[in-house]
Image: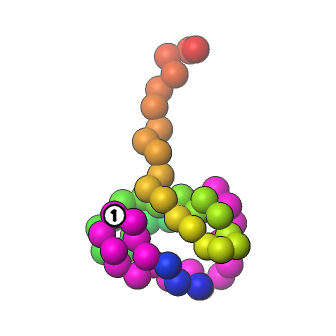
Amino acid sequence: MNTECPECGAAVAFDEAPMAGEIIECEECGVELEVTAVNPLAIAVAPEVEEDWGE
């Protein structure tokens, strides 16, 4: 399975079928990507992890 990095446009390939919510890294630009859908395959830049300060 292949798709395109939304950040830099490079090809992102998967050896195995990805799972929704899986986090991968673009080999070209290094940005973390999240699999948002599997059929059809869709990825987006993963959200930054923020501290909740006990909320």
Quadrant in which the C terminus is drawn = top right
Quadrant hosting residue 35: bottom right
Residue at the image position 57 percent from the left and 68 percent from the top? 42
Q: Is residue 20 left or right of residue 48?
A: right
Above or below, 50 against 43 in this view is above
- Specify the color scheme: rainbow
Query: Within 10 Å of the Cα at label 1, are there few (<14), some (14-19), or many (20+) other Cα atoms?
Result: some
- Residue 10 is situated, as x and y percent measured from the top left of the image, at 35, 78
Would residue 22 appear left or right of 32 to someone viewing this image?
right
Q: Which residues are magenta?
A: 4-21
Considering the image in quadrants, where does the N terminus appear? bottom right
Q: Quadrant of residue 39?
A: bottom right
Q: Residue at x 51, y 22 (%)?
A: 52
Secondary structure beneath label 1: loop
- The spot of residue 13 in percent (x, y) is 50, 82
The kind of residue on which mark 1 rests is Glu
User: Which residue is depicted at the point 49% across and 79% down?
Assistant: 3
Whether residue 14 can be seen here: yes
Asked if residue 22 can be seen in this view, the reply is: no
Magenta region includes residue 5: yes
The residue labelled by disc 1 is 7
Closest to the observer, 25 or 2: 2
Membership of 16 in magenta stretch: yes
Q: Is residue 54 above or below residue 43?
A: above
Q: Is residue 35 left or right of residue 51?
A: right
Residue 32: x %, y % from top left: 43, 58
Q: How many marks?
A: 1
Magenta-drawn stretch, dominant element (helix, strand or loop): loop
Residue found at the far front of this picture: 40
